[in-house]
Image: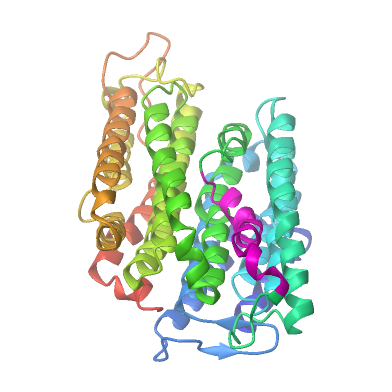
């Protein structure tokens, strides 16, 4: 793991040492992401490297590669910051810091270290929102982000302290002596709720999701991309790691979590159909997709856990690209309103083509990796109980409905008089979308790369 952490650490000096730090940051992050691919092709499908501080299996390797890839693309998408010379070096420093924190989060072999990195990721995210957000309401969005995540994380810290006093370690590798205090055996459900509450807020689960749309709408494009692409996956990653140690507790509490998740997916899908803000619609769709991840993890089946990871990877790439497309549209039309953004098909056919490709990926149409993830999750849910068929089918239908609603609202219809024909997209913008879309459609040819970790 040090072969990824050390280069990422050295990158923090780049904004202050080089004049070409913007392009060099992008190239360096992409190079390190290709370097991290070597871990995915490791012959050992279990833990490929262990140390007192770090570990590396295929789940963490996949998420680290995704982190580095999205970090490079979010810098590419933030051209407005570069051209306006809006504290460029500080912006790159925050992005690289967040990337390093996330790499360490997915690499540590100790739950306490994971908790520290889990909380540390909030600081650069908050600074990106407050420093480069678009409107004064970003202060309220930052407050919501901190309030929800920190308050939910305090019970997790208490839970980890209890476990450490009982076992003498908080290792993610040694499950044999990892047990609850005997005095808490009658309060197992309450203890488990305290433990995973932080991850449910981070994902986020419906009811505790209100911070997400606010943060997305007020964040700059870089903040939205890293938030949707990586930060939500921290919750899923932590939940999977804990579920490995306590499968019975997770399975026993699954009816409650699954009911909230599926009901939340239905409600947020209906909210998406009523949205007028492009970024807000994409943000609410994340709640529905991550609800399926909660469903897969809580069922404690191999297919469920594999499907959860595939869905996290697919959603990370797809939602990040949708936010990037929303930003490209905003920079051309200067509005995020779906009432005012009409007729892109005649104004910019290339942009409309990308909107169509990513919209059908968002609704899990073939041949995207989203389809493979949804099939795995649906089959694992039906194996657990046939009663899951109706709500999951309804959520899948509504996902298709709001994805097509997003595409048709933005691209069809007569364009407003104040919009001029948009010149052909530069190769820069096409490259950003292509670098998102290529993994979505190429991974379906070899899904074993991200599904054989268990």
Magenta stretch secondary structure, dominant = helix
Which quadrant is home to the C terminus?
Answer: bottom left
Which quadrant is home to the N terminus?
Answer: bottom right
Q: Is residue 90 above or below residue 327?
A: below
Q: Residue at x 55, y 76 (%)?
A: 245
Q: Is residue 162 above or below residue 388?
A: below
Q: Residue 42, how many percent across, how many down?
A: 42, 87
Q: Residue at x 55, y 34 (%)?
A: 213
Segment tinted magenta in the rendering? 183-205
Labels in figure, total? 0
Q: Residue at x 25, y 38 (%)?
A: 397
State which quadrant residue 50 falls in: bottom right
State which quadrant residue 268 falls in: top left
State which quadrant residue 55 falls in: bottom right
Q: Taking the image as drawn, is residue 300 in sight?
A: yes
Q: Residue 411, how many percent across, how many down?
A: 30, 26
* 178 within the magenta span: no
Q: Taking the image as drawn, is residue 432 in sight?
A: no
Q: How is the image coloured?
A: rainbow
Which residue is nearer to you in this view: 222 or 257? Answer: 257
Q: Residue furthest left?
A: 366
Which residue is nearer to you in this view: 125 or 201? Answer: 201
* 199 within the magenta span: yes
Q: Residue 77, how many percent across, how many down?
A: 52, 45
| Left or right of residue 215: residue 273 | left
């Amino acid at each position: 793991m040090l072969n990824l952490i050390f280069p990422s650490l050295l990158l923090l000096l780049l904004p202050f040492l080089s004049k070409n730090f913007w392009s060099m940051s992008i190239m360096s992050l992409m190079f390190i992401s290709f370097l991290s691919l070597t871990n995915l092709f490791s012959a050992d499908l279990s833990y490929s490297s262990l140390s007192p501080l770090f570990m590396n299996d295929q789940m963490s390797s996949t998420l680290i590669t995704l982190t580095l890839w999205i970090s490079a693309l979010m810098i590419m998408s933030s051209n407005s910051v570069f051209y306006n010379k809006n504290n460029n070096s500080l912006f790159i420093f925050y992005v690289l810091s967040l990337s390093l924190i996330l790499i360490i989060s997915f690499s540590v072999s100790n739950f306490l270290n994971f908790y520290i990195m889990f909380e540390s990721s909030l600081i650069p995210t908050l600074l990106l929102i407050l420093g480069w957000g678009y409107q004064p309401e970003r202060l309220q969005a930052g407050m919501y982000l901190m309030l929800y995540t920190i308050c939910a994380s305090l019970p997790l810290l208490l839970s980890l302290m209890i476990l450490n006093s009982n076992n003498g370690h908080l290792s993610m590798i040694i499950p044999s002596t990892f047990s609850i205090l005997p005095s808490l055996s009658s309060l197992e459900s309450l203890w488990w709720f305290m433990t995973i509450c932080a991850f449910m807020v981070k994902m986020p689960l419906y009811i505790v999701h209100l911070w997400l749309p606010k943060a997305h709408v007020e964040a700059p494009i870089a903040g939205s991309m890293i938030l949707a692409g990586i930060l939500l996956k921290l919750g899923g990653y932590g939940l999977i790691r804990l579920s490995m140690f306590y499968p019975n507790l997770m399975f026993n509490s699954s009816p409650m979590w699954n009911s909230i998740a599926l009901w939340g997916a239905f409600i947020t899908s209906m909210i998406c159909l009523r949205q007028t803000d492009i970024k807000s619609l994409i943000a609410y769709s994340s709640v529905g997709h991550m609800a399926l991840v909660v469903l897969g993890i809580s069922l404690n089946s191999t297919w469920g856990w594999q499907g959860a990871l595939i869905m996290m990877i697919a959603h990370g790439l797809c939602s990040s690209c949708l936010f990037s497309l929303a930003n490209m549209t905003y920079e051309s039309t200067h509005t995020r309103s779906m009432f005012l953004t009409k007729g892109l098909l005649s104004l910019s056919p290339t942009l409309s083509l990308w909107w169509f490709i990513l919209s059908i990926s968002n609704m899990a149409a073939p041949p995207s990796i989203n389809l493979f993830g949804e099939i795995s999750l649906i089959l694992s849910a039906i194996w657990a109980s046939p009663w899951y068929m109706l709500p999951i089918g309804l959520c899948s239908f509504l996902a298709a409905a709001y994805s097509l609603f997003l595409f048709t609202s933005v691209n069809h219809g007569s364009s407003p008089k104040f919009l001029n024909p948009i010149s052909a997209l530069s190769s820069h913008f096409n490259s950003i979308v292509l670098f998102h879309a290529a993994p979505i459609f190429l991974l379906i040819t070899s899904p074993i790369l991200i599904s054989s970790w268990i």
